[in-house]
Amino acid sequence: MVFRSPTANHLLGHPPDARLLLLNCDDLGLDESVNLAVVDAVRNGIAASCSLMTPCAAAPHALRLLRRHPEVPFGVHLTLVCESADHRWGPLAARDRVPSLLDASGGFFAPTPAGRAALLARARLDDVEREFRAQIDAVAAAGLAPTHLDFHCLADGGREDVLDLTLALGAEYGLAVRVWLPPALARLRAQGLPVVDHGFLDSFTVPLEDKPAHYARLLAALPPGLTEWALHPSTAGPRTDAKADSNRHGPNRHGPNRHAPDDGWRVRRTDHAFLVSPEARRLLTELGITVLGYRTLQEAWQRARGRLTAEAPGPPGVPR
């Protein structure tokens, strides 16, 4: 069988028929049960990297785990929304320095369709930059180095100027950036940056019924090229704020949330169970799928940026 060579495979050093799965765990920092499950899924399961929400109350616990396990690649899950009514988080920058990011109560907007629309309509880009830098710099202050930037509940940042800002921050800090919507993908491919070839799977869009078999079918059907999955492991049972997860996903993000309002914990527990299962590892081996984390993407983005810089025309010579 002849395959059209996916762009990412070439840029990542793989043959054109290789099936590559970028397998990342989102929401590190949300709570301690999430933190333990995410680190377990990377160290002992099939996940290859994760993303940290630095504004959350359990972020210090996550940072301690990351210092203890430097082999775990992680990025910054840039956060401008808060879905939890009981465990509110807000900006790391001073509130009076980012007023356009705050709702009437002085906190982050909820990631409902209405909340996201209100945030994106009023957010000033200088406020967004101030907050994003505070979240990235919180990791550096802990003595750690992230691999990438991605977004919590805002697909490609929700606005083109926010994505452009994030790409500029990624270049400044030497980080890859998660991008998965078609307009931006085409632009970055034209710049020689490796991005996904086949879209993005958010585990909150996966049916709970017979979930391991559903994941197995998705793996069997994985095409050549780079695909990304974002899973959300936790070991916790029902929580008093579990209904918050029902507000996480909508048509402007990774897809509709398929689950009842109190099913968020089931999504997370079943994700963890699959990621650390022997069956998941067996499937990857049997199907010949290569799992990648964002450290690999970071290195490839750095190489690509180096080529772009080297190929850029220099200033015109001074006539003598």
Image (spheres, rainbow, N blue to C red):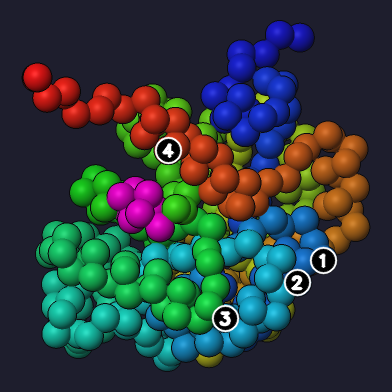
Task: Establish if 226 lies above or below 82.
Answer: above
Give the crowd class for mark 1: few <14, some 14-19, many >=20 residues within 10 Å: few
Q: Which label's residue is closer to the chain start, 3 or 2?
A: 2
- For the residue marked with disc 3, what is the amino acid? Leu
Looking at the picture, tell me which residue is in the foreground, 281 or 314. 314
Tag nearer the camera, 3 or 4: 4
Give the crowd class for mark 4: few <14, some 14-19, many >=20 residues within 10 Å: some
Q: Which label's residue is closer to the chain start, 4 or 2?
A: 2
Q: Position of residue 54 (x, y in %)?
A: 44, 77
Residue 258 visible (yes or no): no
Q: Does dot 1 land on a helix, a strand or a loop?
A: loop
Tag nearer the camera, 3 or 2: 3
Q: CA distance from mark 4 to mark 1?
A: 33 Å
Tag nearer the camera, 1 or 3: 3
Q: Is residue 70 left or right of residue 79?
A: right
Q: Which residues are magenta?
A: 166-173
Tag nearer the camera, 4 or 1: 4
Q: Does dot 2 land on a helix, a strand or a loop?
A: helix
- Residue at the spot of label 2: 40
